[in-house]
Amino acid sequence: MAYVPPHRRHSKESERPLPTPELLAPQFKKNSNDKQYNKSNVGWSGKVVYADNSTHRWCAIPLDDENQFPSFVNLEPVALESAEQTIGKNRVALINTSLNNGSEVKWNLPRSPWESITENVLEDLLSAFKDMRNEMKSAKSKEEYPTLVAKVGKVLFHRSPSVNGASIRKELCTEILKQWRRSFYTNTPVSYKERIVNEVVPKIGVDFKDEEDIYEVQLSDSTKPDLPFSCKCRVMEEHGKLQPCKIKFSPVRNMVMDISCTTKNLDLRLMLCTKKLVADLTDDEMQSITDLINSAILDPNVKGGLRWPLGKESSGDRYRVVTVWHVIANTYRNSSLTLKVKHADRFDFRTLTGEASWWTSLVLENVVSKLQEEKVEASTISEILKEDMQLIWENFLSCEPFLT
């Protein structure tokens, strides 16, 4: 049998498919067990850029008044279909076993889950936004803007092979889990996407805005290795070539909150990010990037939908293609939030792996809009965030068993 390059192999996934400091006095105690990230610690090699003093935390919601897990929640190994060879190894997740038979156990809680989420998130959100605004002022760039994004998926814990799984399940507690590395898996079944589009969209009152069929080409710049950027491209019908339409730096994460929703199928990730357009390119730099993009060959038979002639994946010694994404995104919007449902077909030139997946995310525009007001009470932010969390909890965190 002839050798088939990795990026030509099809994945089954495609078929599953700020307020002033005086106004923002701390209201809740920080948990010192969670990790603070510095930008110098996670750079381009980690594919994630963090702001200085950014915060990354995890919490489980809902727990009882003694901070204990429900009896029907267990920590179980997970097997995920993915082209990433390591993603399914030694990964465990909190699984609600009561959902296996289609029922949901009623859990007596001291307060609603969305109140608990807001309580866990609020102080970090306010603090991170304050730092973000100060950095944006010092940068004096009109091209930077903040965004608060909620993604649905599953929190995966990276368990050491030496850990006794049976003993952990017997004495399951948040303090143990906080010490483990974790990742957030955003791929959801195509049936989940269909339920969101057909049932949730009309229920929550968001209107269809548009559908985009775009390619995103992520590039590295040898002169700025800590500032990866991407080119959003469209296909020009007249000649069938890619044309860059927006160039932006990878989002800088100021706050990441992973939330294991123990009585639901899916979990939640909240991210406060700074986004910045690339506006200071010289004509020669822009021409080099455009030439590199234009040399791409559209090919529906490869992962990511793009390939380059041999040796043409770079422009001199400076710009190099790192990943390509073919994204079909449906956008729905109302005055307070934007819902995006995406099908993303990806290929990574560093690892020679690719996969197709469905993503669902919400941009919480009302919260960010209020945060940018000069004078606003922390209680106002809390109430808006609580409303958004209730909407997400009741409409976006349930589907058929997510991990099988």
Image: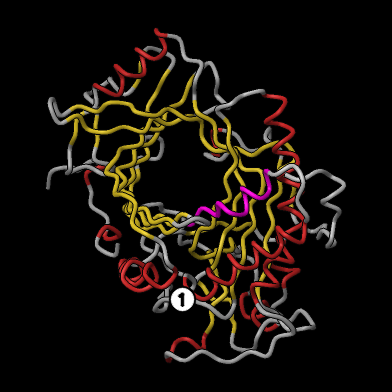
Reply above or below: 37 against 400.
Answer: above
* Residue beneath the point at 38% across and 56% down: 332
- Taking the magenta stretch, the answer to whether it contains residue 284 is no
The x, y position of residue 312, in whole percent, is 28, 20
Judged by its main secondary structure, the magenta piece is helix
The x, y position of residue 268, in whole percent, is 55, 64
- Taking the magenta stretch, the answer to whether it contains residue 364 is yes
Quarter where residue 261 is shown: bottom right
- Which is more toward the observer, 35 or 268? 268
Q: What stretch is highlighted in magenta?
A: 362-372
Quarter where residue 318 is shown: top left
Furthest residue toward top: 284
Tag 1: amino acid: Ser
* Residue beneath the point at 51% across and 65% down: 154
Query: Left or right of 375: which side holds 225?
Result: left
Q: Name the residue under label 1.
A: 398
Quarter where residue 290 is shown: top left
- Which is more toward the observer, 75 or 225? 225
Reply above or below: 115 against 185.
Answer: below
Query: Left or right of 369: which side holds 355?
Result: left
- If the image is split into quadrants, where does the C terminus sit? bottom left
Count neighbours of disc 1 (C-alpha within 10 A) and say few if under 14, some if 14 to 19, many if 20 or more. some
Question: Helix, strand, or loop for circle 1?
Answer: loop
